[in-house]
Image (tube, rainbow, N blue to C red):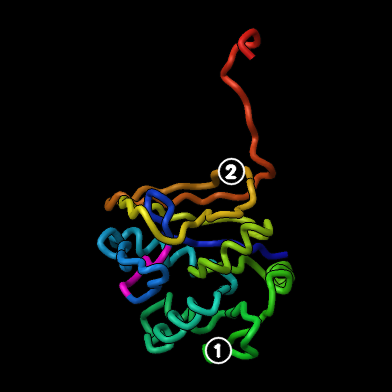
Amino acid sequence: MGRLTVTTFVSLDGVMQAPGGPGEDVDAGFAFGGWLVPHMDEAGGEAVARVHLEAAGFVLGARSYGLLGSHWPRVPDEGNPLAAKLNSAPKYLVSRTRTSGDWSPTTVVSDTAALRRAADDADGDLLVIGSSDLLQSLLAEGLVDALHVWTFPVVLGEGKRLFGRGTRPAGLELQDAEVFPSGVIRSTYTLAGEPRTGSFLLDEEA
């Protein structure tokens, strides 16, 4: 039985919109596209690649599928393990309007329930890449098993956030963490049931 996992890049204030380039996602006039690039050092890049190389397959919403699918097939697989992995591994495009994908091998799934079944049947993790709108649905429905969150030393103040409105409350358990020379922090969490609460008040103050 496989897992549905997520890798995502966020600013310190939780924005995940358009990390890789100015034209990646300009919804709502977002002006900071490419905010990730100045902070990605060699060690961080190797760690990002490692997370992808360990996945059994990849999950993408329509926008991310279009962006990545227009880039990676043009990158030669020889000498580039990440390109070889992305181009050869199973890819799941979540779309209600498309019936096929042009980045082989691609399976189109029409809803998150079908995606969950595909993850359950996978021999390893299906990794959600980017796909901010799809990710909000997966989080709201409690379908994510683990998250690799890369936090970058920048505050953006606006943009699509990892945990947006309607996110289902959940407890998280830290499995692993790394700090890179550029100040980027990778934190890997698994879901751990409902949030726990407590109080520092003394009994007589409660």
From the top left corner, tell me how far across and down residue 178 is, in percent.
41, 49
Could you tell me how far apart the alpha carbons at marks 1 and 2 are, in whole angstroms?
35 Å
**Vertical order, 196 against 24 (above or below):** above
Q: How many marks?
A: 2
Looking at marks 1 and 2 on the same chain, the residue that comes earlier in the sequence is marked by 1
- Numbered tag placed on residue 104 in the rendering: 1
From the top left corner, tell me how far across and down residue 88 is, in percent.
53, 83
**Vertical order, 47 against 121 (above or below):** above
In the image, 145 versus 51, the foreground residue is: 145
In the image, 27 versus 55, the foreground residue is: 27
Image quarter (top left, top right, bottom left or bottom right) of the N terminus: bottom right
Q: Is 87 left or right of 95, judged from the image as shown?
A: left
Label 1 crowd (10 A; few <14 / some 14-19 / many >=20): some
Q: Is 172 left or right of 47, judged from the image as shown?
A: right
Q: Secondary structure at mark 2?
A: strand
Q: Residue at x 35, y 66 (%)?
A: 30
**Vertical order, 101 against 117 (above or below):** below
Q: Which residue is mark 2?
A: 173
Q: Residue 20 colored magenta?
A: yes
Pointers 1 and 2 in contact (C-beta within 8 Å): no
From the top left corner, tell me how far across and down residue 147 is, in percent.
55, 56
Q: Quadrant of residue 112?
A: bottom right
- Numbered tag placed on residue 166 in the rendering: none
The magenta-colored residue range is 17-22
**Residue type indicated by callout 2:** Glu
Q: Secondary structure at mark 1?
A: loop
Q: Is 107 left or right of 113, judged from the image as shown?
A: left
**Residue type indicated by callout 1:** Ser
Q: Residue 154 colored magenta?
A: no
